[in-house]
Image (cartoon, grey):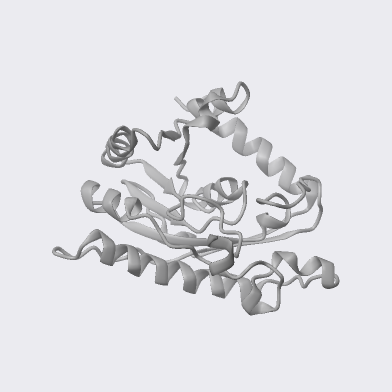
C-alpha cells in the first residue's frame, strides 16, 4: 500500500494552488499506464522531481526517482524518500543502485532519472551519463524523454531560494519513447536522448509565457535566448 506518496502529492498540489503556479503538461499520453518505463528529464532546479512526477499523474503512475543517497540520510527528507520508494544512488557503489532501479523497472515501476546527474547552471542540456539508456535496455522498457522549465525560478543552484514566489509558469513536455534497436550502443542511445532532451527543452523555453522583469532578472534565461546564465563551457568549468 502507498501510505506516503499520495499524501505528499496532495500536499504539493495544495501548495501549487496556494502559489497559483501556472503548470502546463504536454505529452502526458506518452507515459504508459502500466508496465515499467524510464522517465529521463533535464535538470534545472532542486524541485524538478516534483514536477516530473506530476506529469505522470494523468497515467495514474507514481514515479520512483533515483536521487543521491545523502537525501535519504536527512532526518526529514529521508523517511519521506524511503516511504515513497525512491531509489538512493551512492556514487561509490553505483552497481547496487543500478540493480535496484532495474528490479523496480522489471517489477512494472516508472523510474525517474536525471541523466545530467547535476543541475545545469547554463540552463541547457549538459553531457549525459549513460545510465538511463542502460537501464531501459537492461530492463527492456521504454526510454521516455521529458523537459521541465520554470521551477529554477523558485530554487536552483547559485541563486536565492524563493519558494513562496507566486504565479510562476511551469512547463513540462513529455516526448515519445526513444526506440532501442538491438546492436545500438548505450552511448549512441544517450546521444539520441541528449538530442531529444535539447529539442524538448528548446520548445518549452521558447513557449514560456513570462519574460524577465528587467536586466537583473535575466539570470533565469540561457545565454542563447538573451539571458545571463553562463554559457555551457563556462558552467562546466
Q: Is residue 62 above or below residue 224?
A: above
The residue furthest right is 214
Q: Nearer the viewer, residue 223 or 98?
A: 223
Foreground residue, 69 or 176?
A: 69
Residue 163 is left or right of residue 50, and the answer is right
Residue 225 located left or right of residue 236: right
Q: Nearer the viewer, residue 151 or 175?
A: 151
Location of residue 179 in the rendering, given as x and y in whole percent from the top left corner: 27, 66
Q: Position of residue 208 (x, y in %)?
A: 67, 71
Residue placed at 36% from the left, 51% from the top?
38
Image height check: is 190 above or below 16?
A: below
Please indicate whether residue 26 sits to the left or right of residue 36 in the image: right
Q: Residue at x 66, y 55 (%)?
A: 151
- Which residue is depicted at the point 52% across and 30% down? 70
Q: Quadrant of the C terminus?
A: bottom right
Considering every residue shown, the one lying at the far left of the view is 183
Residue 187 at x, y percent in the picture: 27, 62
Quadrant where the N terminus sits is top left
**What is the x, y in percent for residue 74?**
59, 25
207 sits left or right of 147 in the view: right
Q: Nearer the viewer, residue 154 or 85?
A: 154
Examine the image and state in which quarter residue 217 appears.
bottom right
Taking the spot 34% from the left edge, 33% from the top edge, the residue there is 93
The image quadrant that residue 25 belongs to is bottom right
Amino acid at each position: 500500500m502507498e501510505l506516503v506518496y499520495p499524501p505528499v502529492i496532495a500536499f504539493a498540489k495544495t501548495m501549487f494552488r496556494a502559489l497559483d503556479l501556472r503548470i502546463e503538461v504536454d505529452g502526458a499520453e506518452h507515459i504508459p499506464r502500466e508496465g515499467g518505463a524510464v522517465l529521463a528529464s533535464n535538470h534545472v532546479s532542486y524541485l524538478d522531481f516534483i514536477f516530473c512526477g506530476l506529469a505522470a499523474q494523468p497515467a495514474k503512475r507514481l514515479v520512483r526517482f533515483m536521487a543521491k543517497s545523502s537525501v535519504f540520510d536527512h532526518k526529514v527528507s529521508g523517511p519521506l524518500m524511503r516511504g515513497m520508494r525512491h531509489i538512493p544512488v551512492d556514487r561509490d557503489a553505483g552497481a547496487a543502485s543500478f540493480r535496484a532501479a532495474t528490479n523496480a523497472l522489471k517489477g512494472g515501476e516508472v523510474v525517474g532519472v536525471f541523466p545530467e546527474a547535476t543541475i545545469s547552471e547554463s540552463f541547457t542540456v549538459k553531457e549525459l551519463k549513460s545510465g538511463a539508456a542502460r537501464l531501459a535496455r537492461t530492463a527492456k522498457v521504454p526510454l521516455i524523454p521529458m523537459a521541465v522549465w520554470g521551477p529554477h525560478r523558485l530554487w536552483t543552484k547559485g541563486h536565492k531560494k524563493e519558494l513562496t514566489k507566486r504565479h510562476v509558469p511551469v512547463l513540462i513536455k513529455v516526448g515519445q519513447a526513444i526506440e532501442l534497436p538491438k546492436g545500438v550502443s548505450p552511448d549512441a542511445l544517450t546521444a539520441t536522448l541528449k538530442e531529444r532532451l535539447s529539442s524538448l527543452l528548446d520548445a518549452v523555453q521558447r513557449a514560456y509565457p513570462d519574460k524577465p522583469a528587467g536586466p537583473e532578472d535575466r539570470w533565469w534565461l540561457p545565454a542563447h535566448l538573451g539571458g545571463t546564465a553562463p554559457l555551457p563551457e563556462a558552467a562546466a568549468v
